[in-house]
Amino acid sequence: MSFEHLLQYVLSGITNGSIYAIVAIGFNIIYNTTGIINFAQGEFVMLGGMTAISLAAFMPLPLAILAAVVITSFAGALIDFLFIRRLKSPSVLNMIIVTVGLSIMIREIALHIWDEKVRSLPYFTGNEIASINLLGAYISPQVLWVLGVCSVIVVFLGLFFKFTLTGKSMRACASNMIAARLCGINTRNMVTISFMLSAAIGALAGCVISPITQTQYDCGTSLAIKGFTVAILGGLGNSTGAIIGGVIIGLLEAFSISVMPLAYKDAIAIAILLVILFVKPSGLLGAREAAELKEF
């Protein structure tokens, strides 16, 4: 394998890994506050992309993306108000099942609104032809947007959870929900904010990746599976682990194409997920509590 081909695989793997990492971070936000896995996270990515595509026909692209992020974040809050809050003393398993049902429902609603057509946003800068030559390998300008957005999200969340009162309150809920409630923290509002923040991040990811991957009503399912795999690999609740896990999964997928048919690409994430759950369910940088997922 030539150096140019090797570098091309590495760049492709990092790009895909960054996409999976953003989805994994969305999983982590809700897990940190509630202790549940939101399997509707992939649908937030799809909703963000589809909404921005529809709005871009009537307004400038930056405004369309901003509006899509806001609309999707309110959809996340609506999910919490209508479904999560109505559960009376639910177990973690019950809440996970609810999010799976919500994922299916959102996907069916999207099918009726946008049908089965594949759509995409225009490239933020340049186009699919204008690629950047990097030591013999080619990279799309949109890839730089993906990497940049992923970096900004990680930095923003780090500052948000460390220095803001709301972020500290959400971390308190993650440590002990009952103790946080006794300290005067409105835990219900913290859960709502976590759903809104997770949905907003998912929507932003859906907008940024749309020019590269294109957007369809059911594209969130595969992203959710890979994002969940990355979250488990990196350690549930750990954003740094999500970045590391995303890069690992992305590189494995990229290099697998050179030795296996493209049809097996998606199976790699499932295989890795199964291995992690059996060998080290807490992930690379995760806490031991993540091992409890084996019970489900």
Image (cartoon, grey):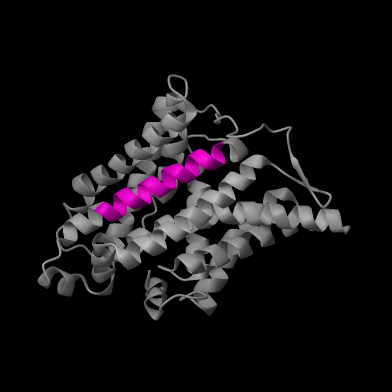
User: Can you give x and y, in whole percent of width and height, for residue 47 in the image?
Assistant: 41, 37
Label count reads 0
Is residue 152 shown left or right of residue 171? Answer: right
Range drawn in magenta = 193-210
Is residue 164 shown left or right of residue 43? Answer: left
Compared with 49, 279 (above or below) is below
Q: What secondary structure predominates along the stretch shown in magenta?
A: helix
- Residue 200 forms part of the magenta stretch: yes
In the rendered image, the quadrant that contains the N terminus is bottom right
Q: Residue at x 26, y 64 (%)?
A: 170
> Which residue is at the front of the view, 107 or 255?
255
Q: Residue at x 38, y 62 (%)?
A: 159
User: Can you give x and y, in whole percent of width and height, for residue 128 in the image?
Assistant: 69, 33
In the rendered image, the quadrant that contains the C terminus is bottom left
- Residue 2 forms part of the magenta stretch: no
User: Can you give x and y, in whole percent of width and height, for residue 195 in the image?
Assistant: 30, 52
Q: Residue at x 41, y 78 (%)?
A: 287
From where the camera sits, is residue 156 visible?
A: yes
Q: Residue at x 41, y 55 (%)?
A: 26
Is residue 215 shown left or right of residue 31? Answer: right
User: Can you give x and y, in whole percent of width and height, for residue 203 in the image?
Assistant: 42, 42
Quadrant of residue 108 within the rendered picture: top left
- Check the image and name the residue furthest to the right: 2
> Which residue is at the front of the view, 170 or 267?
170
From where the camera sits, is residue 257 visible?
A: no
